[in-house]
Amino acid sequence: MMMWVLSCASTGYPTHSLRASFKTKAKVRSSSQVSVSLSTHHHQQQQQQQQLLLHHHQDHPFVPEVVKAVDSLYSEFRAVDNLVACNTARVLKAFQNARVGSHHFGGCTGYGHDEAGGREALDQAFAEIVGAESAIVRSQFFSGTHAITCALFAFLRPGDELLAVAGAPYDTLEEVIGKRDSYGLGSLKDFGVNYREVPLAGDGGLDWDALVGAVKPQTRCALIQRSCGYSWRQSLSVNEIGRAIKTIKMQNPNCLVMVDNCYGEFVESIEPPMVGADLIAGSLIKNPGGTIAPCGGYVAGKEKWVKAAAARLSAPGLGVDCGSTPGDIMRAFFQGLFLSPQMVGEAIKGTFLVAEVMSSKGYKVQPLPRVQRHDIVQAVQLGSRECLLAFCEAVQRSSPVGSFTKPVAGTTPGYASEVIFADGTFIDGSTSELSCDGPLREPFAVYCQGGTHWTQWGLVLGEILKSI
């Protein structure tokens, strides 16, 4: 008798299939009696096995393709659990050093001057976690794009040059930079900041040969995008970011390095400030919000430049010591940050599962199955508009919120192409929760991310395989 045993709660990684053995006892009186007894018992065993197999197929939550993938990912899932433990220890230590207490969850109103120290404790803990001198973590950041913009404007002045060293930046930064017309609304280009970019190498990674010599005396800031964005390329490891920073600083020690850290937090055991980044920025409805932060973003790095980014968020002279934050949001920020390593770990397991299943069906995936992850994004090249729409519709049908709705491609502020989003999430647009999206353009790739538990992707994949 064969039984597939899969624990969805007690362990963080899949168990191996197990075989159960049975011992048969028969009281022997004659050869004919033995023959009849064993024959009858064998028939009963066959009936029991058929009933159990039927019961298994009826009750098992995963389709066979997912079952097979899960059983093959034991070592990868266990490695992720080790990463989660390492990062959780780092977060816990930072909370203890900041002496986080329940009084920090009180929040504040009005100008935010009469505040019980929650902002300071959160900033201190966050800075320690990412290895930075300072940090500003605020609900007033609209998005990751907003936080990154504040960081760029902290660095750059008229006549300076911004150099993107990892190919074209994410779509929503095009109007910030001035690559796409912002109609005089205040892009970097409007303020006289020049822009260049170093294209990616043929394999989708950094072009190291081109990077050597790319930095000029007028290059004030180098922008490194850690995640793939909407490009079919490799996401960067923190070690690769560190190597790029050394290459940049050797050419121009005064060139400041800004890392778009979105989707990368807690995917490794180190963060970019630990390898020399001057500033990093990102969103709290991605990794560091732990799926429960309702809004916000962060900037972290060298104290001087964090203060400059804070002045861009608020105003010169106001800095980091003002701004109201309701108590329920402040508590969610602390709790979400503590949960982040675990939630990121589940999202990473989800990327392994998506890659394993979709590649087995012949689809191109990025990253490839079973290779080390550097962000929580798993791209799947679907090849046609119809397949991309069907994939996103299947994800939406399998979501806990808005499962009855149908995602429709359309124009979205900040994006040049039509984009479709499937995000039946509790926090609007939260990509730390299970979601996917993609631009309606060649090669019609969908970008999957998030998930509070890897088993959710296991369920969703069953619906996807029926739809594409």
Image (cartoon, grey):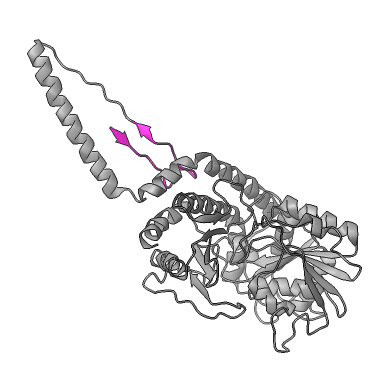
Q: Is residue 353 left or right of residue 236?
A: left
Residue 316, placed above or below residue 286: below
Residue 184, placed above or below residue 225: below
Q: Is residue 370 left or right of residue 201?
A: left
Within the image, what quadrant is residue 387 found in?
Answer: bottom left
Residue 445 in the image: x percent, y percent?
Answer: 53, 64
Magenta stretch holds residue 211: no
* Camera-nearest residue between 457 and 428: 457
Within the image, what quadrant is residue 393 found in?
Answer: bottom left
Residue 275 appears in the figure: no
Residue 442 in the image: x percent, y percent?
Answer: 55, 69
Q: Residue furthest top?
A: 30
Within the image, what quadrant is residue 277 found in?
Answer: bottom right
Residue 86 in the image: x percent, y percent?
Answer: 64, 45
Q: Is residue 160 left or right of residue 313?
A: right
Residue 460 appears in the figure: yes
Residue shown at the point (15%, 25%) measured from the top left: 41
Residue shown at the point (16%, 17%) measured from the top left: 26
* Camera-nearest residue between 364 and 162: 364
Residue 456 in the image: x percent, y percent?
Answer: 44, 56
Q: Which quadrant, please, contains the N terminus? A: top left
Total numbered labels placed on residues in the image = 0
Residue shown at the point (23%, 35%) measured from the top left: 49
Image: magenta residue range: 1-19
* Camera-nearest residue between 402 and 126: 402
